[in-house]
Image: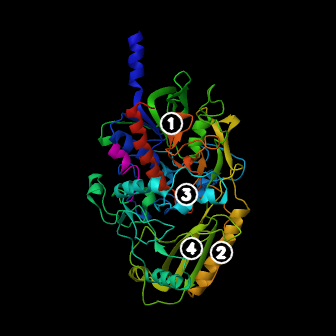
């Protein structure tokens, strides 16, 4: 009987466990299996295999029952996720529905989630900028949050490492605020975007308009062909899944790459309940899982554990991992677990029109657009708000069609759109300040369908965010006016936090175990064989998109973890 028990434990024991299969979980799986570790990847959602599980990827607009629109009944049943720009008839299967995974909103918070293999890497907007030392030094300079335990130099080689594999397009712009990377050819500008770039450059020394850096393969390299991926086709329906692998996703890239090693076991429909801490051994030994199909509780064991469940769910897992040693959550000696959650401020937009260049128009579609890096509070504190904001920018030709006629004459009219002037538009992406008052916690009474405490979310805006919105609107209005744009209109959507889909923090990195959970290797200070490398680890949020930084941190942490395992220190 004893041998039977030992054999049963061996069957559920691995070298490593990765919780989550999204952007950072996929990288953890790739790196750990690539270094020879037998790795179990736990995904709470269903399996989604590259190409075969993209049911709408080649569906034409007229083939959708509702022409792509969501029926009123679905919108009313899903008031939160229906606010997401990417949620429509062609993508509903990749989004969590409101009623299926409840949570508690102490303040309005639109939590947008994708529970499946690949997670939100199937749905992201694919902007991939490196962070600079202006971002990593921000907390130390203005005193909000704690100092990052790393600087740009720590991540630079790992940025290069992941950029080459993922495929990032862009220009080498030579900006201190936005370090250059290992770029594939950039996407093209249209004439009004180029015109705006020149107007801004002519009036401001510290403001730049550049082409966005995006995770699209514009010129495949051998490493991309080895992944089975091909050049981006500019279909601009990326959120349905790309059968070409033209943009980076875990499904097209890291997960199948890990599977090819023969070292990965992927277990979908596995809702992680908690991490098991062995007080005698003084370390984590495994993970408790609720099977989403049978609701049966089971355990899996490993020497190291990477937590990549997506920022807020990673907080939930750690808070729910209690023991005599850690009664308030795994590694929570400092008491800051779940606190200092932050996000990005996308509230403001501005639009306008341009009467010039009517002899030109756009050509085809483009899955990317120009980008304006942060220019506020860069070299010194110059404004009445902390940190800054970046902005997107794009221009296109307005048109309408003559719908007169019938039969052949109607068809002839429809295929010849009548061009109007140009529209221009921009949106802000502001850095919010991590504060103790922005937190998540476990509800003491309410449980989810798997018997796990629901997450209480208490995260919102503050005066700093309002001042930033005001400044963005003023400055972009000035820049649009200088460029000769007309009918300029600015709006503050006052949307709830969360709709930006960039939630970060709660398990922050830091130099001091008394004020942080993770050290400079993304390793829990008080539980060295557990690593957190998704958005939960972020100490501050910068103005850049965070996904590329998650990838680089994950690859770096996995490399460190395996070296330490070989030394026998974890």
Please, what secondary structure does the residue beneath circle 3 have? helix
Q: Residue pushed farthest top?
A: 1
Please, what secondary structure does the residue beneath circle 1 have? strand
CA distance separating discs 1 and 2: 43 Å
CA distance separating discs 4 and 3: 26 Å
- Residue ID for mark 1: 530
CA distance separating discs 2 and 4: 10 Å
- Residue ID for mark 2: 473
Magenta stretch: residue 257 in it?
yes
Please tell me which residue is depicted at 30% across the width and 65% down the height of the picture: 219
- Residue ID for mark 3: 136
Q: Earlier in the sequence, mark 1 or mark 3?
A: 3
* Foreground label between 2 and 3: 3
Quick one: label 3, few (<14), some, or many (20+) residues within 10 Å?
many
Q: Earlier in the sequence, mark 2 or mark 3?
A: 3
Q: Earlier in the sequence, mark 2 or mark 4?
A: 4
Quick one: label 1, few (<14), some, or many (20+) residues within 10 Å?
many
Residue 516 position (above or below residue 364): above
């Amino acid at each position: 009987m004893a041998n039977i028990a030992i054999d049963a434990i061996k069957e559920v024991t691995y070298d490593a466990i990765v919780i989550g299969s999204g952007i950072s979980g996929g990288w953890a799986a790739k790196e750990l299996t690539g270094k020879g570790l037998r790795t179990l990847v736990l995904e709470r959602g269903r399996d989604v295999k590259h190409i075969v599980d993209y049911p709408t990827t080649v569906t034409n607009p007229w083939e959708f029952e509702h022409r792509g629109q969501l029926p009123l009944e679905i919108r009313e049943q899903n008031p939160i996720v229906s606010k997401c720009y990417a949620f429509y008839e062609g993508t509903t299967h990749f989004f969590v529905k409101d009623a299926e995974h409840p949570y508690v909103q102490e303040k309005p918070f639109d939590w947008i989630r994708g529970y499946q293999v690949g997670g939100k890497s199937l749905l992201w907007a694919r902007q991939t900028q490196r962070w600079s030392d202006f971002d990593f030094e921000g907390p130390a300079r203005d005193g909000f949050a704690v100092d990052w335990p790393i600087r740009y130099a720590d991540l630079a080689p790992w940025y290069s490492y992941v950029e080459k594999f993922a495929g990032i397009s862009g220009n080498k712009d030579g900006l201190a605020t936005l370090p250059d990377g290992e770029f594939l050819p950039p996407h093209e500008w249209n004439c009004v975007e180029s015109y705006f770039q020149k107007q801004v450059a002519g009036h401001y020394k510290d403001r730049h308009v550049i082409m966005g850096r995006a995770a699209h393969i514009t010129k495949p390299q051998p490493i991309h062909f080895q992944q089975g991926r091909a050049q981006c086709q500019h279909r601009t329906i990326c959120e349905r899944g790309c059968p070409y692998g033209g943009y980076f996703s875990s499904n097209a890239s890291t997960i199948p790459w890990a599977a090819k090693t023969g070292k990965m076991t992927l277990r979908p429909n596995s809702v992680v309940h908690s991490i098991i801490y062995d007080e005698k051994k003084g370390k984590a030994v495994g993970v408790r899982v609720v099977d989403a199909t049978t609701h049966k509780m089971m355990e899996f064991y490993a020497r190291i554990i990477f937590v990549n469940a997506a920022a807020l769910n990673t907080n939930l897992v750690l808070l729910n991992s209690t023991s005599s040693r850690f009664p308030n959550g795994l590694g929570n000696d400092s008491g800051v677990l779940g606190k200092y959650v932050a996000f990005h401020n996308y509230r403001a937009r501005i639009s306008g029109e341009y009467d010039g260049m009517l002899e030109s128009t756009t050509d085809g579609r483009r899955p990317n657009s120009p980008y304006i890096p942060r220019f506020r509070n860069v070299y010194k504190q110059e404004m009445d708000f902390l940190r800054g904001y970046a902005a997107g920018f794009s221009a296109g030709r307005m048109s309408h069609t003559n719908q007169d006629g019938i039969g052949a004459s109607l068809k002839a009219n429809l295929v010849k759109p009548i061009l109007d002037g140009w529209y221009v538009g921009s949106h802000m992406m502001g850095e919010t300040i991590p504060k103790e008052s922005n937190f998540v916690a476990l509800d003491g009474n309410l449980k989810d369908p798997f018997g796990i405490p629901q997450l209480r979310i208490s995260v919102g805006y503050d005066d700093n965010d309002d001042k930033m919105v005001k400044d963005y609107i003023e400055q972009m209005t000035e820049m649009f006016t200088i460029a000769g744009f007309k009918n300029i209109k600015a709006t503050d959507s006052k949307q709830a936090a969360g709709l930006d889909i960039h939630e970060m923090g709660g398990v922050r990195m830091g130099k001091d175990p008394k004020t942080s959970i993770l050290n400079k290797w993304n390793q829990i200070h008080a539980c060295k064989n557990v690593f957190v490398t998704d958005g939960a680890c972020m100490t501050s949020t910068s103005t850049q998109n965070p996904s590329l930084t998650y990838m680089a941190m994950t690859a770096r942490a996995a490399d460190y973890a395996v070296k330490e395992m070989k030394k026998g220190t974890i």
